[in-house]
Amino acid sequence: MIDSLGLLVGVLLLLILMVLATKGWMGARQLHDPPAGPNEGELPEPCPREFVSMVFSRTDRDFVHGLNSRGVEQLFQRERKKVALVWIRQTSALVRKAVSEHAFAARQSKNLDFLKEVNILGQFLILITSCWILTIAIQTAGPVWLSGLANYAQRLSQQVERLQGSFQAGILATAKGTRVT
Amino acid sequence: MDTTDKALTVERAYDDLLRRSLSSISGDLARLIYLASTRDYNTGRYHHDGLAARFRVDVASQALELAHRQTFYRIAARSLEDLVGELDLYINSSRQNRDEVIQVWQKLEPYRVALPVNVNVVVAQLFVSNIRLALAILRQRLGREELRALAS
Protein backbone atom coordinates (compact mmCIF):
# COMPACT_ATOMS: atom_id res chain seq x y z
CA MET A 1 0.00 0.00 0.00
CA ILE A 2 2.78 2.39 1.04
CA ASP A 3 4.81 1.30 -2.00
CA SER A 4 2.02 2.08 -4.43
CA LEU A 5 1.36 5.40 -2.66
CA GLY A 6 5.05 6.26 -2.97
CA LEU A 7 4.97 5.31 -6.63
CA LEU A 8 1.90 7.47 -7.19
CA VAL A 9 3.54 10.45 -5.47
CA GLY A 10 6.70 9.87 -7.51
CA VAL A 11 4.76 9.74 -10.78
CA LEU A 12 2.85 12.87 -9.79
CA LEU A 13 6.05 14.74 -8.95
CA LEU A 14 7.57 13.64 -12.23
CA LEU A 15 4.51 14.83 -14.11
CA ILE A 16 4.60 18.20 -12.34
CA LEU A 17 8.31 18.55 -13.18
CA MET A 18 7.63 17.67 -16.82
CA VAL A 19 4.81 20.23 -17.03
CA LEU A 20 7.05 22.91 -15.49
CA ALA A 21 9.93 22.02 -17.80
CA THR A 22 7.66 22.15 -20.86
CA LYS A 23 6.22 25.46 -19.67
CA GLY A 24 9.70 26.86 -19.19
CA TRP A 25 10.86 25.60 -22.55
CA MET A 26 7.78 26.95 -24.33
CA GLY A 27 8.11 30.27 -22.51
CA ALA A 28 11.73 30.60 -23.55
CA ARG A 29 10.84 29.73 -27.14
CA GLN A 30 7.82 32.02 -27.36
CA LEU A 31 9.76 35.15 -26.42
CA HIS A 32 8.94 37.44 -29.25
CA ASP A 33 10.35 40.68 -30.57
CA PRO A 34 13.87 40.51 -29.15
CA PRO A 35 15.34 43.97 -29.74
CA ALA A 36 18.22 44.51 -32.14
CA GLY A 37 21.21 42.38 -31.19
CA PRO A 38 24.15 40.72 -32.88
CA ASN A 39 23.61 39.11 -36.26
CA GLU A 40 23.16 35.40 -36.84
CA GLY A 41 26.40 33.53 -36.26
CA GLU A 42 27.94 36.32 -34.16
CA LEU A 43 28.78 35.50 -30.54
CA PRO A 44 26.65 37.72 -28.31
CA GLU A 45 28.55 39.66 -25.67
CA PRO A 46 27.71 38.64 -22.08
CA CYS A 47 25.27 40.92 -20.32
CA PRO A 48 27.09 43.39 -18.02
CA ARG A 49 26.77 42.29 -14.39
CA GLU A 50 24.99 45.39 -13.13
CA PHE A 51 22.14 44.74 -15.56
CA VAL A 52 21.85 41.08 -14.50
CA SER A 53 21.52 42.32 -10.90
CA MET A 54 18.83 44.76 -11.98
CA VAL A 55 16.74 42.00 -13.57
CA PHE A 56 16.74 39.99 -10.34
CA SER A 57 16.79 42.90 -7.87
CA ARG A 58 14.00 43.63 -5.41
CA THR A 59 14.37 47.43 -5.57
CA ASP A 60 12.04 47.86 -8.56
CA ARG A 61 9.62 45.26 -7.19
CA ASP A 62 9.38 47.12 -3.88
CA PHE A 63 8.72 50.36 -5.76
CA VAL A 64 5.97 48.72 -7.84
CA HIS A 65 4.50 47.05 -4.75
CA GLY A 66 4.29 50.47 -3.05
CA LEU A 67 2.07 51.76 -5.87
CA ASN A 68 -0.82 49.55 -4.73
CA SER A 69 -1.89 48.64 -8.23
CA ARG A 70 -2.58 44.99 -8.98
CA GLY A 71 -2.46 45.62 -12.74
CA VAL A 72 0.97 47.27 -12.64
CA GLU A 73 2.28 44.55 -10.34
CA GLN A 74 1.12 41.82 -12.71
CA LEU A 75 2.64 43.65 -15.67
CA PHE A 76 5.89 43.99 -13.71
CA GLN A 77 6.02 40.25 -13.03
CA ARG A 78 5.36 39.42 -16.68
CA GLU A 79 7.96 41.90 -17.95
CA ARG A 80 10.70 40.85 -15.52
CA LYS A 81 10.06 37.18 -16.32
CA LYS A 82 10.46 37.98 -20.01
CA VAL A 83 13.77 39.81 -19.48
CA ALA A 84 15.10 37.06 -17.20
CA LEU A 85 14.27 34.42 -19.81
CA VAL A 86 16.06 36.44 -22.50
CA TRP A 87 19.10 36.51 -20.20
CA ILE A 88 18.95 32.74 -19.68
CA ARG A 89 18.61 32.18 -23.41
CA GLN A 90 21.60 34.43 -24.09
CA THR A 91 23.67 32.71 -21.40
CA SER A 92 22.84 29.25 -22.78
CA ALA A 93 23.75 30.44 -26.28
CA LEU A 94 27.10 31.74 -25.00
CA VAL A 95 27.90 28.45 -23.27
CA ARG A 96 26.90 26.35 -26.29
CA LYS A 97 28.84 28.54 -28.69
CA ALA A 98 31.96 28.51 -26.49
CA VAL A 99 31.78 24.72 -26.18
CA SER A 100 31.23 24.13 -29.89
CA GLU A 101 34.21 26.38 -30.72
CA HIS A 102 36.30 24.47 -28.22
CA ALA A 103 35.11 21.12 -29.61
CA PHE A 104 36.05 22.24 -33.12
CA ALA A 105 39.54 23.23 -31.97
CA ALA A 106 39.88 20.00 -29.97
CA ARG A 107 39.04 17.91 -33.06
CA GLN A 108 41.94 19.54 -34.91
CA SER A 109 44.37 18.84 -32.08
CA LYS A 110 46.53 15.73 -31.80
CA ASN A 111 47.68 16.21 -28.21
CA LEU A 112 44.48 16.35 -26.16
CA ASP A 113 44.60 16.40 -22.38
CA PHE A 114 41.89 13.88 -21.43
CA LEU A 115 41.40 15.13 -17.83
CA LYS A 116 41.16 18.72 -18.98
CA GLU A 117 38.53 17.78 -21.57
CA VAL A 118 36.49 15.87 -18.97
CA ASN A 119 36.67 18.92 -16.69
CA ILE A 120 35.43 21.18 -19.49
CA LEU A 121 32.59 18.78 -20.26
CA GLY A 122 31.67 18.78 -16.56
CA GLN A 123 31.59 22.59 -16.44
CA PHE A 124 29.49 22.68 -19.59
CA LEU A 125 26.95 20.21 -18.18
CA ILE A 126 26.71 22.12 -14.87
CA LEU A 127 26.14 25.41 -16.67
CA ILE A 128 23.53 24.05 -19.05
CA THR A 129 21.70 22.28 -16.20
CA SER A 130 21.81 25.52 -14.17
CA CYS A 131 20.26 27.42 -17.07
CA TRP A 132 17.56 24.77 -17.35
CA ILE A 133 16.78 24.87 -13.62
CA LEU A 134 16.74 28.69 -13.65
CA THR A 135 14.32 28.69 -16.60
CA ILE A 136 11.91 26.48 -14.67
CA ALA A 137 12.34 28.52 -11.47
CA ILE A 138 11.73 31.81 -13.31
CA GLN A 139 8.69 30.41 -15.11
CA THR A 140 7.27 29.12 -11.86
CA ALA A 141 7.99 31.89 -9.38
CA GLY A 142 9.32 34.87 -11.36
CA PRO A 143 12.85 36.23 -11.04
CA VAL A 144 12.35 38.63 -8.14
CA TRP A 145 10.47 36.23 -5.87
CA LEU A 146 13.27 33.74 -5.52
CA SER A 147 15.59 34.78 -2.73
CA GLY A 148 19.20 34.20 -3.58
CA LEU A 149 18.48 33.86 -7.27
CA ALA A 150 20.22 37.15 -8.00
CA ASN A 151 23.43 35.89 -6.42
CA TYR A 152 23.12 32.60 -8.19
CA ALA A 153 22.53 34.40 -11.48
CA GLN A 154 25.60 36.54 -10.84
CA ARG A 155 27.75 33.51 -10.15
CA LEU A 156 26.45 31.81 -13.27
CA SER A 157 27.26 34.90 -15.27
CA GLN A 158 30.81 34.98 -13.89
CA GLN A 159 31.23 31.25 -14.54
CA VAL A 160 30.27 31.75 -18.18
CA GLU A 161 32.80 34.58 -18.48
CA ARG A 162 35.51 32.41 -16.93
CA LEU A 163 34.54 29.45 -19.12
CA GLN A 164 34.79 31.66 -22.19
CA GLY A 165 38.19 32.89 -21.06
CA SER A 166 39.52 29.39 -20.39
CA PHE A 167 38.11 28.11 -23.68
CA GLN A 168 39.77 30.95 -25.55
CA ALA A 169 43.07 30.11 -23.86
CA GLY A 170 42.48 26.42 -24.63
CA ILE A 171 41.74 27.15 -28.27
CA LEU A 172 44.92 29.20 -28.58
CA ALA A 173 46.98 26.48 -26.90
CA THR A 174 45.37 23.81 -29.07
CA ALA A 175 46.03 25.84 -32.21
CA LYS A 176 49.70 26.14 -31.23
CA GLY A 177 49.80 22.39 -30.51
CA THR A 178 48.32 21.66 -33.93
CA ARG A 179 50.89 23.80 -35.67
CA VAL A 180 53.74 22.06 -33.82
CA THR A 181 52.53 18.54 -34.62
CA MET B 1 44.86 60.86 -40.12
CA ASP B 2 46.13 57.95 -37.99
CA THR B 3 44.00 56.00 -35.52
CA THR B 4 45.09 57.97 -32.42
CA ASP B 5 44.47 61.32 -34.11
CA LYS B 6 41.07 60.17 -35.27
CA ALA B 7 40.14 58.93 -31.79
CA LEU B 8 41.16 62.29 -30.33
CA THR B 9 39.13 64.15 -32.93
CA VAL B 10 36.08 61.96 -32.22
CA GLU B 11 36.55 62.71 -28.53
CA ARG B 12 36.69 66.45 -29.25
CA ALA B 13 33.58 66.22 -31.41
CA TYR B 14 31.88 64.27 -28.64
CA ASP B 15 32.75 66.97 -26.06
CA ASP B 16 31.50 69.62 -28.46
CA LEU B 17 28.23 67.73 -28.89
CA LEU B 18 27.79 67.47 -25.12
CA ARG B 19 28.56 71.14 -24.58
CA ARG B 20 26.57 72.71 -27.40
CA SER B 21 23.61 70.42 -28.10
CA LEU B 22 23.03 67.87 -25.37
CA SER B 23 23.47 70.19 -22.38
CA SER B 24 20.46 72.23 -23.50
CA ILE B 25 18.20 69.17 -23.49
CA SER B 26 16.76 68.31 -20.10
CA GLY B 27 16.71 64.64 -19.18
CA ASP B 28 18.51 61.59 -20.50
CA LEU B 29 15.41 60.19 -22.16
CA ALA B 30 14.97 63.37 -24.21
CA ARG B 31 18.70 63.22 -25.11
CA LEU B 32 18.31 59.59 -26.17
CA ILE B 33 15.33 60.40 -28.41
CA TYR B 34 17.21 63.35 -29.88
CA LEU B 35 20.36 61.30 -30.61
CA ALA B 36 18.31 58.48 -32.15
CA SER B 37 16.63 61.07 -34.41
CA THR B 38 20.03 62.02 -35.87
CA ARG B 39 20.37 58.47 -37.25
CA ASP B 40 19.27 57.69 -40.80
CA TYR B 41 16.65 54.90 -40.78
CA ASN B 42 17.99 53.33 -43.95
CA THR B 43 21.73 53.51 -43.52
CA GLY B 44 22.03 53.62 -39.73
CA ARG B 45 24.54 56.49 -40.09
CA TYR B 46 24.30 59.51 -37.82
CA HIS B 47 24.26 63.06 -39.13
CA HIS B 48 24.45 66.48 -37.52
CA ASP B 49 25.04 69.49 -39.78
CA GLY B 50 26.72 71.75 -37.20
CA LEU B 51 29.00 69.04 -35.88
CA ALA B 52 29.92 67.86 -39.40
CA ALA B 53 30.79 71.45 -40.35
CA ARG B 54 33.04 71.88 -37.29
CA PHE B 55 34.70 68.47 -37.64
CA ARG B 56 34.08 65.99 -40.48
CA VAL B 57 31.02 63.99 -41.53
CA ASP B 58 32.50 60.64 -40.42
CA VAL B 59 33.90 62.10 -37.18
CA ALA B 60 30.54 63.71 -36.36
CA SER B 61 28.78 60.43 -37.10
CA GLN B 62 31.08 58.49 -34.74
CA ALA B 63 30.70 61.07 -31.98
CA LEU B 64 26.92 60.90 -32.27
CA GLU B 65 26.98 57.12 -32.21
CA LEU B 66 29.18 57.14 -29.10
CA ALA B 67 26.90 59.63 -27.34
CA HIS B 68 23.86 57.55 -28.32
CA ARG B 69 25.31 54.33 -26.88
CA GLN B 70 26.48 56.01 -23.67
CA THR B 71 23.17 57.75 -23.08
CA PHE B 72 21.33 54.49 -23.76
CA TYR B 73 23.39 52.46 -21.26
CA ARG B 74 23.08 55.23 -18.68
CA ILE B 75 19.31 55.33 -18.94
CA ALA B 76 18.97 51.54 -19.08
CA ALA B 77 20.85 51.34 -15.76
CA ARG B 78 18.31 53.61 -14.01
CA SER B 79 15.92 52.18 -11.47
CA LEU B 80 12.28 51.97 -12.49
CA GLU B 81 11.42 54.81 -10.13
CA ASP B 82 14.01 57.09 -11.76
CA LEU B 83 12.83 56.10 -15.21
CA VAL B 84 9.24 57.05 -14.34
CA GLY B 85 10.60 60.48 -13.36
CA GLU B 86 12.55 60.74 -16.64
CA LEU B 87 9.52 59.78 -18.70
CA ASP B 88 7.33 62.24 -16.80
CA LEU B 89 9.88 65.00 -17.46
CA TYR B 90 10.01 64.10 -21.15
CA ILE B 91 6.22 64.06 -21.56
CA ASN B 92 5.86 67.37 -19.70
CA SER B 93 8.54 69.00 -21.84
CA SER B 94 6.74 67.90 -25.03
CA ARG B 95 3.87 70.27 -24.08
CA GLN B 96 1.31 67.93 -25.56
CA ASN B 97 -1.62 66.25 -23.92
CA ARG B 98 -0.10 63.86 -21.37
CA ASP B 99 -2.81 61.22 -21.69
CA GLU B 100 -2.56 61.28 -25.47
CA VAL B 101 1.25 60.95 -25.46
CA ILE B 102 1.09 58.04 -23.02
CA GLN B 103 -1.57 56.25 -25.08
CA VAL B 104 0.34 56.70 -28.34
CA TRP B 105 3.59 55.52 -26.74
CA GLN B 106 1.83 52.46 -25.38
CA LYS B 107 0.31 51.62 -28.76
CA LEU B 108 3.16 52.44 -31.17
CA GLU B 109 6.13 51.88 -28.85
CA PRO B 110 8.20 54.57 -30.65
CA TYR B 111 10.94 54.23 -28.01
CA ARG B 112 12.07 51.02 -29.74
CA VAL B 113 13.59 53.21 -32.45
CA ALA B 114 15.76 54.80 -29.77
CA LEU B 115 17.81 51.61 -29.35
CA PRO B 116 21.36 51.86 -30.69
CA VAL B 117 22.51 49.12 -33.07
CA ASN B 118 24.14 46.01 -31.58
CA VAL B 119 23.46 46.70 -27.93
CA ASN B 120 23.28 43.76 -25.59
CA VAL B 121 19.94 41.99 -26.15
CA VAL B 122 19.22 41.66 -22.41
CA VAL B 123 19.90 45.35 -21.77
CA ALA B 124 17.73 46.30 -24.75
CA GLN B 125 14.91 44.08 -23.52
CA LEU B 126 15.24 45.53 -20.00
CA PHE B 127 15.03 49.07 -21.38
CA VAL B 128 11.94 48.34 -23.51
CA SER B 129 10.36 46.51 -20.61
CA ASN B 130 11.03 49.31 -18.12
CA ILE B 131 9.62 51.97 -20.46
CA ARG B 132 6.48 49.85 -20.87
CA LEU B 133 6.19 49.68 -17.08
CA ALA B 134 6.91 53.38 -16.62
CA LEU B 135 4.12 54.19 -19.09
CA ALA B 136 1.68 51.95 -17.22
CA ILE B 137 2.65 53.62 -13.93
CA LEU B 138 2.20 57.13 -15.36
CA ARG B 139 -1.15 56.18 -16.83
CA GLN B 140 -2.27 54.78 -13.50
CA ARG B 141 -1.13 57.99 -11.74
CA LEU B 142 -2.98 60.10 -14.29
CA GLY B 143 -6.15 58.07 -13.74
CA ARG B 144 -5.91 58.55 -9.99
CA GLU B 145 -5.31 62.29 -10.40
CA GLU B 146 -8.42 62.54 -12.58
CA LEU B 147 -10.48 60.63 -10.03
CA ARG B 148 -9.25 62.91 -7.26
CA ALA B 149 -10.09 65.98 -9.34
CA LEU B 150 -13.59 64.65 -9.97
CA ALA B 151 -14.11 63.90 -6.31
CA SER B 152 -13.08 67.36 -5.13
Image (cartoon, coloured by chain):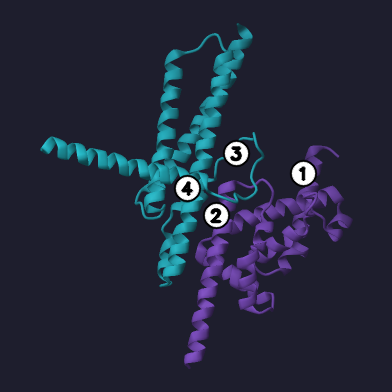
Chain colours: A cyan, B purple
Indicate the secondary structure of the residue bearing disc 4: helix
Residue found at the far top of this picture:
A181
Q: Marks 2 and 1: CB-CB under 8 Å?
A: no
Note whether residue A152 is visible.
no
Neighbour tally class for label 1: few under 14, some 14-19, many 20 plus, Cα within 10 Å: some
| Residue bearing the label numbered 2 | B126
Q: Which residue is mark 1?
A: B7
Q: Which residue is mark 4?
A: A27
Image quarter of residue B15: bottom right
Viewer-nearest of labels 1 and 4? 4
Q: Please tell me whether mark 2 sits on a helix, a strand or a loop.
A: helix
Residue under the image location 65 percent in, 70 percent down: B104
Q: Alpha-carbon distance for marks 1 and 4?
A: 44 Å
The chain holding disc 2 is: B
Categorize mark 3 by other alpha carbons within 10 Å: few (<14), some (14-19), many (20+): some
Q: CA distance from mark 4 to mark 2?
A: 17 Å
